[in-house]
């Protein structure tokens, strides 16, 4: 017979394992998959390369479900507001979603989102998210963004990877509200640069 204490402990352990694996399969210490993608910053497109960006210091790669949605706009804006702190720690920041590049051009320039400060990369086919072993889920039919446009792509889990200059994942941040996700990523970047 299982005691209530043992049952509770098993339940907590199962929930902890589920919570950890639910937001990312890649873990601290894993090599970060390299990627190149079409990206936007302040409305202009450019070719983003993780390898090239790592030459300048750590990179915060944050995956988010969809541009112009409540939590994603909050998270992008929080990264924008805190960008100087990330840069002071030597880090770059790039967001990744399954949105098409045209939408990301507008999102990157929107003052309520990226505010012209945060680069966002298009992973329209989901290959980058899959390389980071993140779960993709279908967007419910008819779901619209804050501009009234239908969201016509899958969603990726809100997960942030802090990647050290050595190309290894220094931390994985997931399962948090958008602003808490940004705060935790900043804490990690500041810690690894000491």
Image (tube, rainbow, N blue to C red):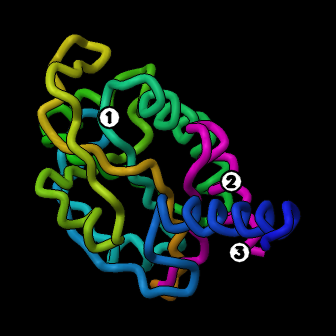
Picture layout, residue 139 above or below residue 170:
above
* Callouts 3 and 2 close, C-beta under 8 Å: no
The residue that label 2 is drawn on is 184
Residue nearer the viewer, 145 or 183: 145
| Name of the residue lying farthest toward the front | 1
In the rendered image, which quarter contains the N terminus?
bottom right
Q: CA distance from mark 3 to mark 2?
A: 12 Å
Check disc 3: other Cα within 10 Å, few if <14, some if 14-19, many if 20+.
few
Q: Which residues are magenta?
A: 168-194
The residue that label 3 is drawn on is 192
- Residue 139: horizontal and vertical position, in percent? 22, 35
Q: CA distance from mark 1 to mark 2?
A: 22 Å
* Callouts 1 and 3 close, C-beta under 8 Å: no
- Residue 46: horizontal and vertical position, in percent? 19, 53
Looking at the image, tell me whether mark 3 or mark 2 is earlier in sequence order.
2
The residue that label 1 is drawn on is 108
């Amino acid at each position: 017979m299982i005691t209530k204490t043992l049952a509770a402990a098993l339940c907590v352990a199962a929930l902890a394992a589920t919570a950890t694996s639910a937001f990312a399969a890649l873990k601290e210490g894993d090599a970060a998959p390299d990627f190149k993608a079409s990206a936007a910053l302040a409305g202009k497109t450019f070719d983003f390369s993780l390898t090239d960006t790592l030459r300048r210091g750590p990179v915060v790669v944050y995956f988010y479900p969809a541009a112009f949605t409540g939590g994603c706009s909050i998270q992008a804006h929080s990264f924008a507001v805190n960008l100087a702190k990330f840069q002071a720690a030597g880090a770059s920041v790039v967001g990744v979603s399954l949105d098409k590049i045209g939408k990301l051009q507008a999102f990157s320039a929107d003052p309520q989102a990226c505010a012209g400060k945060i680069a966002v990369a298009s992973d329209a086919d989901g290959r980058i998210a899959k390389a980071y072993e993140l779960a993709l889920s279908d967007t419910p039919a008819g779901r619209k963004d804050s501009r009234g446009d239908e969201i016509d792509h899958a969603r990726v889990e809100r997960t942030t990877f802090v990647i050290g200059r050595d190309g290894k994942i220094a931390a994985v941040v997931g399962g948090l509200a958008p602003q808490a996700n940004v705060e935790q990523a900043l804490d990690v970047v500041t810690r690894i640069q000491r």
